[in-house]
Image (spheres, rainbow, N blue to C red):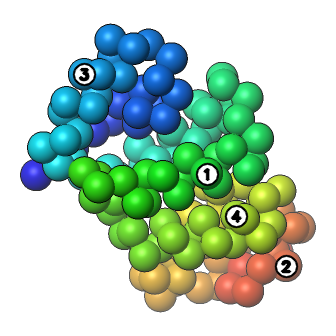
Amino acid sequence: MRAVDTNVLVRLITRDDLRQANSADRFAEKGAWVSVLALAEATWVLATVYEFSAADLATALGMLLNHKDLTLEDSDVVAAALDLFRLRPTLGFSDCLMLHLARKAGHLPFGTFDRALARTAGAQKL
């Protein structure tokens, strides 16, 4: 299966450059894999460059999870991270994703200096 990078994801979501959005659509319609790294980078770009709110990010992530042509790496982990992010958006999606990746891999506790994240099951404040 082919794969996509961060910029393709951003075009699929924002559609801010119609030519690139159409190219992204055509590429993805044959099926495309999305790494968790590309997904995390895309959320960072959407939040910092496009100033997406937490609610907007959650909507975009849900769209990617349910996209008919995309296969997300560890989609079960992404879905669990999205659920946590929706409950506690101040944590940030990337932190939610890292915690759930560690959980899936059996590498808990997840050490952090972040007080809010440390109050999440499986995390430990250092």
Is residue 81 in view? Answer: yes
Q: Amino acid at mark 3?
A: Ser
Label number found at residue 23: 3
Q: Nearer the viewer, mark 2 or mark 3?
A: 3
Q: Nearer the viewer, mark 4 or mark 2?
A: 4
In what element is the residue under mark 2? loop
Give the quadrant of residue 94.
Answer: bottom right
Q: Label 3, label 1: how many angstroms apart (C-alpha)?
A: 22 Å
**Front in this rendered view, residue 113 or 87:** 87
Residue named by callout 1: 59
Residue named by callout 2: 119
Sequence-first tag of 4 and 1: 1
Sequence-first tag of 2 and 3: 3
**Front in this rendered view, residue 11 or 91:** 11
In what element is the residue under mark 3? helix
**Front in this rendered view, residue 28 or 49:** 28
Q: Label 2, label 1: how many angstroms apart (C-alpha)?
A: 25 Å
Q: Label 4, label 1: how many angstroms apart (C-alpha)?
A: 11 Å
Q: Amino acid at mark 4?
A: Phe
Residue beneath the point at 60% across and 65% down: 82
